[in-house]
Structure formats: C-alpha cells, structure tokens
Image (cartoon, helix red, strand yellow):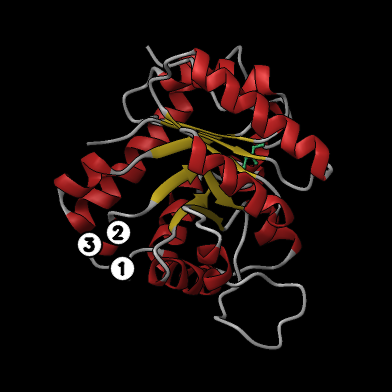
Amino acid sequence: MRKNIVAGNWKMNKTFQEAEELIDQIVVGMEKNSLKCEVIACPPALYLEMASDYAEESRIHIGAQNVSEHEKGAFTGETAAPMLASVDIEYCIVGHSERRKYFHETNEQLAKKVDILLDYGIKPIFCCGEVLEEREKEIHFDVVKKQLEESLFHLNEDEFSNIVVAYEPVWAIGTGKTASPEQAQEMHAFIRSLIAEKYGTKTSDEVSILYGGSCNPGNAKTLFANKDVDGGLIGGASLKAEDFLKIASAFE
Ligand code: 13P
C-alpha cells in the first residue's frame, strides 16, 4: 500500500547537541500524536548513529542526505553505503538539487548511488525537479522525465519498489515560493504516469511521491490533499520540531 511520508532534510544545520534535542523533541511529539504518515529525519552524516539509536526506541525513521557511488577506498570525505548500513540507516536522499548544482552530480552518477544503496538494503529518496528557466521554457516535464529515465529506469520492478520519489522544483527550494497545489499535482501525476508506463500500475500505485520546496505548516494540508502528493521532503521547516510535527499532522 502507498505510504504517506514526511521527511525532514536538515541539510548542513545543527550542532550535535542541537541535533539531539531536535530528534528528541520530534520523537516525544510523535508519541503524543497519532500521525497518519511515516516520519523520516535526515540529519547530517555525523549525527546518523545518534539518530539511529533513537529510531531503535521509537517510530521515527532515519535517512542520510548523501552517499558515495563507491563502495570503499580512497575517497576522502565521502560516506559509503556499507557505512550507512552498519549504523542501520533506512533511507538516503539521492540527487538533491543542491548536490546536482554545487557538487555537479550527474544523472549517471546518481544511478550508481541508487544501485549501491539498494545493494545495501537502503531505500533511496530520489529527488527530481526543474530550475526556473526550464519551467519558463516549458520544458519542466522533459527535464523530470530525463532525470527519472537516466537515474532510475534501469532498475527492475522489484528494485523500483524500494524507491521514494521527491519532486522538488528548484525555484521553490528555500525561496518561500511554493509550487501551487495544481502545479504539484500535475507534475506528481506525470511522474506516476511515467512509472506506470515503465513498471505497470501496481508499482505506480504503490510508489510514494513527495513534494519539496518551501513546504510549511501553513501550506502542507492543501499540498498533501492532492491525490498524487503522498507527503513532503521538508527543508527549513524541519529544523523546528513544532513546525515539522504540524506538517506531519497535515494528513486528513
Ligand atoms: P525548503 O523546505 O527549505 O524549501 O527545502 C526543501 C528541500 O530542499 C528539501 O530537500
């Protein structure tokens, strides 16, 4: 069955103490409310083991923000999939637009990251989305299609069943400018139709497609009310437990 998911991408924020406090507040908040979604926190790599300990004792799930496409070796500063697996990390964000932009990650490289994560039993949260110029040129559907085709569509149906997709229009990330519910629904339905064409309707019905980009407690409900929007990948608003929990409470 398709899952509703709210995932927090903390990006490069929080000291260790602040991170522990935030996880703790989220976990306590989750105990008080019965949420109708799975909640994932994606803290910086350094805090994954601490966060993973919380996951053992509670209903929170933990994801990394990035992984190397290599299994091990001389890649200074990188984190490998077996390292994530060794501290029981369940999810990993792949292909966030900030990684594509600042670290020049390509669709081909992202396909390798997806593969190595699946090899180690970690579920990729695969990000796709167009920049403003591409939307203005009305090529946003082509851009997203190419991202999916080149990084995901080599997978077989079984492998694909472990994928979570996040549509994050780059112009909406950290800008306060959210995609309208209609824009989000239109792209999510398009993504689901591509998945249906490639893998059939059973797979496309079951895949969770999250929206990301200036999602906050004020707009989450109208975004999540759309039939193909199965939750959110939250940046700024995931850094305050109260806001994050309000977003996670937005499912009817
Ligand atoms: P904001 O919610 O801060 O716009 O960030 C979205 C995002 O990039 C989540 O991965």
Mark 1 sits on what residue? 155
Q: Is residue 247 above or below residue 183?
A: above
Between tags 1 and 3, which lies in front? Answer: 3
Residue shown at 20%/56% (left/top)?
Answer: 199
Badge 1 local density, few (<14 within 10 Å), some, or many (20+)? Answer: some
| Mark 2 lies on residue | 160
Three-letter amino acid code of the residue under disc 3:
Asp
At mark 3, the secondary structure is helix
Query: Residue beneath label 3, please?
Result: 158
Give the image location of residue 62, x and y in percent: 54, 45
Q: Residue furthest bottom?
A: 74
Which type of secondary structure does the marked residue at label 1 adopt? loop
Query: Looking at the picture, does residue 179 appear above or below residue 192?
Result: above
State the image quarter where residue 234 is shown.
Answer: top right
Q: Can residue 194 be seen in this view?
A: yes
Q: How far apart are marks 1 and 3 (CA)?
A: 8 Å
C-beta proximity under 8 Å, tags 1 and 2: yes
Residues under numbered marks 3 and 2 in contact, where contact means CB atoms less than 8 Å apart: yes
Residue at point 57%, 58% (across, down): 95
